[in-house]
Image (cartoon, helix red, strand yellow):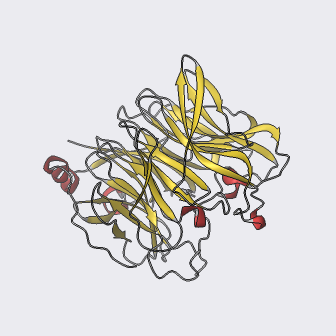
Amino acid sequence: MRIIKYALLAAALSACSREAQVTQPSESRSQLGANTTYQVVKYPTLGGSLSRGMAINNHGVAAGWSMQADGTRRAVLWQNSNSIMPLGTLGGPSSTVPWPGLNEQGMVVGISHTGLVDPLDEDWACEFAGFLTEVTNLICRGFVWQNNVMRELPPLGGYHSFAAGVNNQGQIVGWAETPVHDPTCDPTTKQVLQFRAALYELKKGAISVRQLRPLPGDSTSAATAINEAGQAVGISGPCDQAVGRYSAIHSVMWDKSGRVREIPHLGGVTWHTPMDINQRGDVAGFSNPAGVVPEDDFEPHAYLWIYGTAAAVDLQTLPGDLFSQAFAINQDGQVVGVSFGGANGSHAFIYQNGQMTDLNNILGTGNGDIFRSAQDINDAGQITGRVFDAATGKTVPFVATPLP
């Protein structure tokens, strides 16, 4: 069923049920989650028709992206509901924050076009997965933005790089090309070079980078998130297309020393993608369940893996939907994401106390607005994502704050 082939991680980057004993969130958070109401605020945009909140830290600062009137995209930071700060680019037309890439110090990570031409004209993840919407032959690099300065994150000897997550120690994870021409790459997508998960650190003003290696026997890896203990999660597999699919045949975790091990997924062959990890080591993401045919189709279910348990829990979908993706998890085990593939289009969800709930049933204003996705949740339970604004016809960022 080729309904949405590369929605990965849009996040733009999963049903056999494996029943596992799930550790529930603390009682105080469970009770708050069950009974709370929210104050919802729509955040300003740069004038285009699409914008999205992608990350929110524990100070309530949000980061994401906003389209401009000319169709280009900009990574942005919202210090509050009355301000929007474009973060610029690395010399190319567009930039974005594609993951929950924001820490407590306001350091933002993401990706940007550069002004440099890719001599291999690869598709790479930036454009192929729709994170940057223009089709160009420009090199894309990960960036770190701090103190009003955007800095480029170097590749591992190849051309392209990608930044996804950052912790409060300033450790940044993502993936980057090596100079190796990898025969496991899919030639139909024009991916040529091998890529590996990358761990960047800023030390005395300099940026260092080292590989986080794939599982033995795999050629490529990519890291998507990192917690304060230095545990990183991501994918491992063949090169394929540099966007999930077969390169995500394994979900993995690296410890702070870089040792890699496989972690559970939902049993399918492809698209096993951890999206976030909390301080306990619990992981939320999406995965193809067993039985998907063809095996490379994108038919994910959101999942939750409690650290140390034997299996990942299939969070299923909202009623009437076929697919779902979990994007973020907070310290208390609340998970947010998107459910889609039904007649009502995509709807944001929150999973808590063993149940997935449509955020429209909690946040709905009755004015026709539709909360399309929830991209991140902080430890206070604040949620950011995207909402269809019925009054303007535009999709705009929102922040929902729990009321006492």
Residue 333 visible in this rendered orientation of the protein:
yes
* Residue 99, position as x, y percentages in the image: 52, 47
Left or right position of 119 against 132: right
**For the image shown, how many numbered marks are present on the structure?**
0
Residue at 82 percent across and 52 percent down: it is: 121
Left or right position of 265 against 36: right
Q: Can you name the residue that lies furthest to the front here? A: 216
Height in image: 144 above or below 316? above
Which quarter of the picture shows residue 169?
A: top left
Which quarter of the picture shows residue 24?
A: bottom left
Height in image: 197 above or below 19? above
* Residue 303, position as x, y percentages in the image: 38, 64
In the picture, which quadrant includes the N terminus? bottom right
* Residue 321, position as x, y percentages in the image: 44, 75
Residue 13 visible in this rendered orientation of the protein:
no
Which is more toward the observer, 303 or 391? Answer: 303
In the picture, which quadrant includes the C terminus? top left
Residue at 80 percent across and 44 percent down: it is: 138
Left or right position of 239 against 103: right
* Residue 338, position as x, y percentages in the image: 44, 62
Which is more toward the observer, 339 or 315? Answer: 315
